[in-house]
Image (spheres, helix red, strand yellow):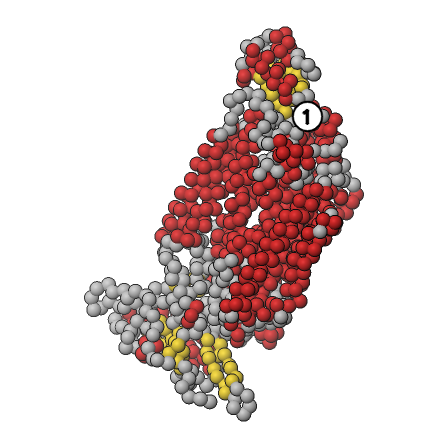
Amino acid sequence: MSALYALYADGDSAQRAINALQAGGVSRDAITVLSGEPIEDQEFFETDKSTWMWYFASAGGLVGLIFATWLTRMTELAWPIKTGNMPIVSWWPNLIIMFEMTMLFGILAAVLTLLVTARLPGPRPVLYDPEIMDGKILVGVVNPANAAAVERALSQPGAEIRRSGN
Amino acid sequence: MSEASARKLSDDLLRPLLQTSWRFYVLVAFLGAIVLMGLGTWAYQMYNGFGITGINHPIFWAFYITNFVFWIGISHAGTLISAILRLVNAGWRRPVTRCAEVITAFALMIGALFPIIHLGRPWLFFWLMPYPSSRQIWPNFRSPLVWDFFAITTYLTGSVLFLVLPMIPDFALVRDRTTGLRHRIYGVLALGWQGTPKQWHRLESAMQIMAIAIIPVAVSVHTIVSFDFSMAPVPMWHSTMFGPYFVAGAIFSGIAGLIIAMAALRKFLHLEAYLHPVHFQNLGKLLLLMSLLWAYFVFAERLTIWYGNEPSEIAVMYVTQKGSFAPLYWTMVVCNFVIPFTILSLRKLRTIPGCVIASFGVLIGMWLERFLIVVPSLGHKYLPYSWGVYRPRPVEIIITISTFAAMTLLYVLFSKFVPIISIWEMKAGDHPSPALSAAASHEHALGETHA
Amino acid sequence: MSPVSSVVASFGGRESLMAHKWGLAVDLDRCTGCGACVTACHAENNIPTVGPEQAGRGRAMHWLRVERYWEGDFPDVQLKFRPVMCQQCDAAPCEPVCPTYASHHTDEGLNAQVYNRCIGTRYCANACPYNVRFFDFFNPQWPKPLHLQLNPDVSVRGIGVMEKCTFCVQRIQAAQIDAKAGKRELADGEVKPACVQGCSARALVFGDLNDPESEVARLARLPRGERLLEDLGTLPNVTYLSRQTEG
């Protein structure tokens, strides 16, 4: 495995490199972009939205609500035991359980969605440079088909071009 | 952030992980000894019987329940700072969030132990969990103790996830900076984190969702803890105000705990460049606000009782204010209101030491407040023939002290193995989302280092 | 007038049994404060004596206690007694708060305490406004030969559980079994809890509140009948007949 990548000091240069790579025919999936912190003022790939997580979290909350409603009602009816003149299926206390389970399942659904879509836990990254933790942004291509073209695209001002692998 | 300043940031905040002085070992040994003593005392209590405590008829709840409510209250620090400040995009939260979230996680774990410690048959505590048992019986969902179980489980799960997920990128950093066994362990903990934009987006979305979800959960947790009292027909317990009163008190004691923790970290881990006086002043203002809110609730409750003149409630109110509990009561008022109000409303006094003094006062005052809610009411219920007196026994005092040692120990150990300030969040302050206005971007400067 | 809130179950036919609703009446005029009821309760229900040190710490376990009140100043002092036991409330605040259903309501109007389900949270004791619930702080000891005094019909409670007056449910059940075996109905006054049996002044009357002809139902209807802490809404099933005489 060989990779050709460059480290950039700011988001703008990295964005230019990405644009140049895509203009040169490299597909989006083949471009690796890594950073040591979220670069929120850049949209490296325009369609990288993660709004689906909200739907999954809400769906998880709904599952929690249904589960808690069923659990409280089923257990209270399964062995009806009178306590303190309260009804066998007591809605006021059941609402509390239903609320907690809704929130719990919603949170768990959000976390599960995160782990699955971010592919965590995942294998050791194929292309990596510890210098991204010092504020650099890594843009590169693994096993480039046309190494010279990739190197040209990566050659933005301020880039440090590196090779890894063989 | 320039490369040099980013590297300095990483160096400073990783130093506690990579360098250890002899003082760390001494501190851990000392705290560990106290914690072991507490655990041993608990084992002694389980072996010799619950009778070695000071509990009697009619005061069936005392120190352990006070501690339970106190520690669950402390746990509200993390939520307020982390989640609310994150949602309002306050930049000054960045160095503070993980310190606060750690307090929440550990305070919850300690607080959740107490419902087990105070049981007559603690080995059967799992009967509060809903599982298909061979006895074919389920927990009683009408009981506030079962609500406690669900609420604390939800809050603990949510808080731990809220704490652990943003640790993943920092584990990747530590992985990159270490070698050998540490490198391998942190590599496992980093879960193969790469730092692609997609991963960052997903992480931040998940944090946003959890921040929104954890706030109502936190409010519900301490409300449900207050329901342990307000659902019982006991004078001065059966109050409709207990929910908001307890939540306000929890946030109050939580902020005090956070200020103390931050001051200790700043001093002992040399984080002066990251935890600025302005952070403490902001938290000090919040503490002042909560002190006023606490005083408002106490006033509203006692005015209502005094005006209503119902004999059993008046008896309890007067025994706390004028009777045998009066020294504790007035200490509580001074610690919770007089001292914080004086120190925190005067800018000259609202320094880091001033905030820490006020916070210690608040911790003492809030512990006393929990005690004064539990014990005087139980000692003076509706039938005066059965009124009683409570004296704590050594076992309860030792266990109480050991929980403070346990909290400190857990905190010290955590800051040894995980960066106590979230490194990636500090760096991210340099790249605020364009959705924020220019004024908010200036706030992010507070998260920066002055390198 | 004691509110009759439980349902009268009739399964059709004259042979069917009405559901009982057990109640107690205490005539405060007759009570002399002798304490025989307390002793009888201890003997019948295997209640331990905790010893002077524990009693001094407030842990005496008298399921039934005789409260003693002094009124007035010498020489016009009056002494009044009130035996207080579990009121077997219809709307018992101790029942919904128990997380394990150890404290619950039976179909015959009793508040039952199931020792095996109790994990000792002591919430029920806090919720009880009458302070009639007790906790086993230690394992009770009956050094030989005192173990011979234990009543085999009543379980001996271990450490960490709550206990309280049961209206001598073992005697109720024994009488019901007898009646069923004899193919007859229970007669009024056939069931006598230990305190009722032990009272020399016949101040305590026990019976079925659902039977309008029973003695206890008649006493509950008397104008001088009152309930303890009635305004709390617990719907107690013990009627106290207030004193008519002075001194």
Residue B134 horizontal side relative to residue B46, left or right: left
The answer to which image quadrant residue B194 occupies is: top right
Q: Quadrant of the C terminus of chain A?
A: top right
Q: Please give the name of the residue rendered at 48% of the width and 46% of the height, measured from the top-left corner.
A: A100
Whether residue B191 is visible: no
Residue B195 horizontal side relative to residue C127, left or right: right
Residue furthest toward the bottom?
C75
Residue C13 horizontal side relative to residue C32, left or right: left
Q: Which chain carries label 1?
A: A
Indicate the position of residue C240 as horizontal and vertical percent values.
40, 78
Q: Please give the name of the residue rendered at 46% of the width and 67% of the height, measured from the top-left corner.
A: C155
Is A77 drawn above or below residue A106 in the view shown? below
The answer to which image quadrant residue C246 occupies is: bottom left
Indicate the position of residue C222 as horizontal and vertical percent values.
34, 80
Question: In the image shown, does B310 or C85 lie closer to the viewer?
Answer: B310
Is A150 drawn above or below residue B434 in the view shown? above
Q: Please give the name of the residue rendered at 55% of the width and 71% of the height, measured from the top-left corner.
A: B315
Is A78 drawn above or below residue C80 in the view shown? above
Indicate the position of residue C152 as horizontal and vertical percent values.
44, 71
Whether residue A157 is visible: yes
Q: Please give the name of the residue rendered at 67% of the width and 38% of the height, measured from the top-left corner.
A: B95
Q: Which amino acid does label 1 sit on?
A: Gly
Residue at the disc numbered 1? A135
Residue A67 horizontal side relative to residue B400, left or right: left
Residue furthest toward the left?
C13
Q: Is mark 1 on a helix, strand or loop?
A: loop
Q: Quadrant of the N terminus of chain A?
A: top right
Question: In the image shown, does B333 or C177 lie closer to the viewer?
Answer: B333
Neighbour tally class for label 1: few under 14, some 14-19, many 20 plus, Cα within 10 Å? many
Indicate the position of residue C185 as horizontal and vertical percent values.
27, 73
